[in-house]
Amino acid sequence: METKPPLPPFTLETALQKVQAAEDAWNTRNPERVALAYTVDSEWRNRTEFFSGREAIKAFLQRKWQKEQDYRLKKELWCFMDNKIAVRFEYEWHDQAGQWFRAYGNENWEFAESGLMQRRYASINELAITASERRFLWART
């Protein structure tokens, strides 16, 4: 059986580890790697999109990162209980024309006993920013 430690039920330490692992994975912008953190039938809501399964997750992330160039994300643990974690996040990206954006949101995560995420519900808002307003000035990868 496939597992993704740390496993639920979460403690403060393991919830923080799970959040950091998610942030690190998403910042790779590698759909194959990111999708491995989810169950094969994982259920997602991302803004107004609803879908399920790793293949749908990979397709979504490929579309996302083709549009959202130089994407950089920061997640913060909001709360946790048993097999659930809530995070707040913000990320920055620019489009093909060079316009920068910052997105803010919340995610609710539910994990299977294996430590793989079986549900991810995300609410996200974004605004256009100037390059001088950027907060995440990591080196380009």
Image (cartoon, rainbow, N blue to C red):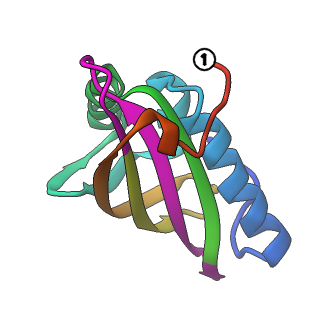
The magenta-colored residue range is 79-101
Farthest right residue in view: 13
Residue under label 1, please give it.
Answer: 140
Q: From this view, report whether residue 111 is shown above or below residue 72.
A: below
Q: From this view, report whether residue 11 is shown above or below residue 4.
A: below
Q: Secondary structure at mark 1?
A: loop
Q: Which image quarter: residue 115?
A: bottom right
Reply yes or no: does residue 56 show up in magenta.
no
Q: List x then y, in percent, for residue 12.
A: 80, 76
Q: List x then y, in percent, for residue 102.
A: 40, 48
Q: List x then y, in percent, for residue 53.
A: 31, 42
Q: Residue at x 72, y 68 (%)?
A: 15
Q: Which image quarter: residue 63?
A: top left
Q: Residue at x 46, y 41 (%)?
A: 92
Q: List x then y, in percent, for residue 10.
A: 73, 74
Magenta region's main secondary structure? strand
**Quadrant (top left, top right, bottom left, bottom right) of the N terminus:** top right
Q: Is residue 23 left or right of residue 34?
A: right
The amino acid sitting under disc 1 is: Arg
**Quadrant (top left, top right, bottom left, bottom right) of the C terminus:** top right
Residue 36 shows up from this direction: no
Q: Residue at x 62, y 46 (%)?
A: 23
